[in-house]
Amino acid sequence: MSKETRAVGIALLSTVVFLAVIATVITRSPGWDTFKEFFLDPTIYRDSFAEIATAFKLNVRIFLIAEAIILPAALLLAVLRSLPGPVFFPIRALAVVYADLFRGIPTILVIGMLGFGMPSLEIAWIPKSFVFWGIVSLVLVYTAYVSEVYRAGIDSVHSSQEAAARSLGLKHTQTLRYVVIPQAVRRVIPPLLNDFIGLQKDTALVGTLGVVEAFKQTQIDTSATFNFTPYLVAATLFVAITIPLARFTDWLVARDRKRQQAGRLT
Amino acid sequence: MRTALIPGLALAVALIVAATASGSSTAPAAAAEIPGCSKATLNLLVPGTLTIGADNPAYPPWFGGDEKTKPWKISDPYSGKGYEAAVAYAVAKQLGFATAAVKWVPLPYTNSYTPGKKPFDVYLTQVSYKPERARAATFSRSYYFLNQSVVGRKGTPIAGVKTVAGLKRFKLGAPLGTTAYDYIVKYIKPTSKPNVFDTLDQGVKALKNGQIDGLLVDLPTAFYVSAVQVSDGVIVGKLPTRGTKEQFGMVLAKGNPLVTCVNRAIDRLWANGTIAKLQNTWLAKAGAPDLK
């Protein structure tokens, strides 16, 4: 038996034993029957799936729109924060305050404050739509996070790169545009995707404004039946889109590492 | 259980009529013990105490009184004021509990039906009986039969609506956990997606902000919302009953035998006219236009 097959065999065996132990502990628990009835009702799962899946489309719409705004906005913010010289101090300071503020306030509060707060100003041109303010809140919060990711990427590009570019006669903006940012962005793609997954999940928070998205639909179904199986439906849907993205991120990271190491050898 | 509604209602109506017809009959001041329901034999969370769960904040007209006992907000169930508080104390009295032996625990509505041990004997906060719900929790007989209704703002287009079909073109909202959302989706079928709010307050805010045109709540709540919470609020109308008449019941842990005695107490309150009297005291007597 080769070393490899043995390793695979051990891995399989240990996984099976591990799962069996967990399954036994759970199914032998005193509340298992109740749990099954309240969280794993196949009929309710089937019945509520279509409705929750329909509501889930709104989550997908929300995160696609939000992400499309977040990616460029966060990059702009990161660039503003890295502007050199005393003249740009106010801009840098504002960028810092913004990032601190929106990373500090829990997303659910931002959503609640903007969603119910802004329309109560009763300014005619201010939109009243809950979905609109939900997206705005997610954009504000995630732009703050993502700009930090970009900034880390920009900082990770060695200063010799910038020096070389400047010595070739490129201006600061040109250096950023052609030398620093392309390298920075490539390096931060995995953490960017990570934040994207976070954003997908946080779309459920828009439900707190009364918008019937997947989680709110889950709550509606749960309260109509006093059964929690719809939670499992929503979880299935979220996982169904986040897992492929997580695997894709892993693959990107692996590919990147391979390339870098290959580069080192030559 | 499921069929309790119709005979219960018929009995109640018959007895109220009988009671009012014969004037002051035999209703004694101190409730006689219900046979088979002596306090010592009841299945209680804490022996000797009736523990009642309710949502916090407790809203009028269901709960009344000023904020006094912590952590209750807006109203105080301990005051015994408001329809649900009054019914709860009346049931407690029928079962032999002194006022001081009633304990209130604040509990969000969504936690009233979570599986596992309940922190209450009975829970009441406008929970509508539904057959699906009765599979997961035990419901008492109804202590109130209701209609959903629409609250709007004066001078807005929805205020002039006279029919259910007329509501179609408006943005509607309802608090979570009520049957109003079902009603919207099944019978009104509005063109824009309705909103479902976690709390009544959020729905009221959305109505004030003009983020929704109409809020669907039960009629007594509608009176409160339109009179107190929204300065330019108006009840657009009462929605017609579709299917069985909607009813509020007390929620008990699934299979809790206490329900038998709670039901007997509620039956007595219907029979001796207490419920009619309490409704008269605490719920708005004014009518609302019927939506056709």
Image (spheres, rainbow, N blue to C red):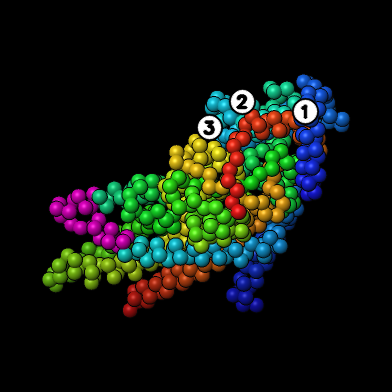
Q: Amino acid at mark 2?
A: Ser
Q: Are marks 1 and 3 on the same chain?
A: yes
Mark closest to the chain's N terminus, 1 or 3: 3
For the residues labelled 3 and 2, the Cα–Cα distance comes to 12 Å
Quadrant of image for the N terminus of chain A: bottom right
Q: Residue furthest front?
A: B21
Image position, residue A164 (x, y; %): 18, 69
**Which element type, helix, strand or loop, lies under badge 3?**
loop
Q: Which mark is residue B94?
A: 1
Image position, residue B183 (x, y; %): 61, 55
Report the residue marked by disc 3.
B74
- Subunit of mark 1? B
Whether A91 is among the magenta residues is yes
Q: Nearer the viewer, residue A89 or A43?
A: A43
Q: Are marks 2 and 1 on the same chain?
A: yes
Label 1, residues with CA under 10 Å away: few <14, some 14-19, many ≥20: many
Image position, residue A158 (x, y; %): 25, 64
Q: Quadrant of residue B272?
A: top right
Report the residue marked by disc 2.
B79
Q: Nearer the viewer, residue B229 or A132?
A: B229
Give the magenta range: A73-93
Q: Main secondary structure of the magenta part?
A: helix
Q: Amino acid at mark 3?
A: Ile
**Which element type, helix, strand or loop, lies under badge 2?**
helix
Q: Residue furthest top?
A: B29
For the residues labelled 2 and 1, the Cα–Cα distance comes to 18 Å
> Residue sitting at 68 percent across and 47 percent down?
B246
Image position, residue B236 (x, y; %): 53, 47
Q: Answer above or below: position of A59 versus B151.
A: below
> Residue sitting at 44 percent across and 57 percent down?
A131
